[in-house]
Amino acid sequence: MVEKQQSPSAGNKPLNVRIAENVKALIEELGLRPHEPVPSEGELAKLFGVSKMTTKLALERLASEGIVYRMPRRGTFLSPYQDESLPLEEATKPVAAAEPNVGSAAKQTASARADMIAIVVPNLDDYVSQIVVSVEAEARASGKGLQLVVAGAREDECLAELAKSGVEGIIFYPRDPKTCSDQVLRLKLQAYPIVIIDRIFRDIQIDSVYHDHYTGTYNLVEYLLNKGHRNIGYISSPIDGITSREERYHGYIQAMLYNGLSVNQSYIMLDFNREHEMRFLERNEQHAAYLKLNPEITAVVCANDYFAASLIHTALLDGIAVPKDLSVVGFTDLALSALLSVPLTTARQPTDQLGMRAVRLLLKRIHYGTAQPISEQIPIDIVERESVQDLTLGR
């Protein structure tokens, strides 16, 4: 049996990383097959003697690596897609076959699949799983079956196989946020119905549904301004041609300028190392140096919730009170945001609207067709928690 986890001080790796490695060993020991359930967060916490937060982060890490997939309210399951030797028929097998409206691509004929649409995703972490659930609900309400494919690095193969199998159309959440793949372009040129979700590609016009990252960040800055903050920083990983990162950054810049505030370059960090994204429960040297360089900053907008969690943890370890001395806001509203030591105020990306409108746009393309590609933006809300200090109080 896998041994209990050592204390958090053991070794140099973060605890959740070590737990993830233990879970992989446990999966092998149990001989789990693709689509079989992995022990729950609570079971793993008890087995390894750690908190449920740690096992949650460990499972999220494995989901991001494509080793497992997570379904809200259903659990965590072993994914077949980490094994490149699996035949494509196995890769396109539905992972939610217990649902009555989810069919088997391997056994159905094209005629039997006339009422079937598909969604292709790179993995099934918490965020992507919420999108899938909303797509499934809208597909069911529209009388359509749903084929779910977790493609990992085999997106082009899976897209081609699905189109060939006779599904009416595909909703696609690409792994690469920068570049439209050759297979997507090929399907577009063939007038095959496909809708891209949560991505925008500059090099090709194609049906898409995505969140309004620009306005979401703009509103976060205005929220902080209304709370009396003026020295407001911004933290992101490199823009690197990724539209969502670019739009969030521009939203920050424009909100500052529109409200008559100068943009201090030392307040802006655009090189946060994403390798540390899941290590937010330890002190981050980049964040520590940033805070030391800019002691006058009263608030920081972070490009995602992981960065915000890391900044909060580092600030607290360095004796900076959150939110009394430093206010922090994030972006996405991951499940962990409400569980932090200081619950995070953040911009919420509503997955229910994303999934619903993606299905409706796909069905519009299937049934009616349009001459020009359609792009739909989903508004983003602010979820107010406890990580922002109101500086206007007591004035």
Image (cartoon, rainbow, N blue to C red):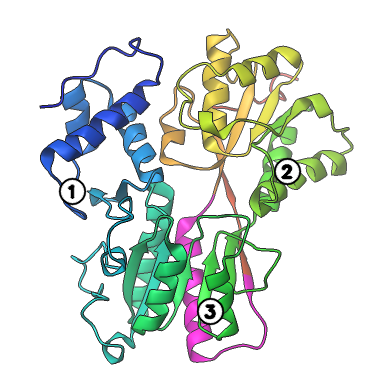
Q: Which mark is residue 306?
A: none
Measure the alpha-carbon separation of dots 2 and 1: 40 Å
Q: Earlier in the sequence, mark 2 or mark 1?
A: 1
Q: Residue at x 76, y 46 (%)?
A: 250
Disc 3 vs disc 1: Cβ atoms closer than 8 Å? Answer: no
Label 3, on which residue? 187
Q: Secondary structure at mark 2?
A: helix
Going by the numbered disc 3, the residue's amino acid type is Leu
Local crowd at mark 3 within 10 Å, few (<14), some, or many (≥20)? some
Q: State whether residue 142 appears in this view.
A: yes
Q: Earlier in the sequence, mark 3 or mark 1?
A: 1
Tell me: 326 left or right of 114: right
Q: Which mark is residue 37?
A: 1
Counting from the top left corner in percent of width and height, residue 273 is at 60, 30
Measure the alpha-carbon separation of dots 3 and 1: 34 Å
Label 2, on which residue? 249
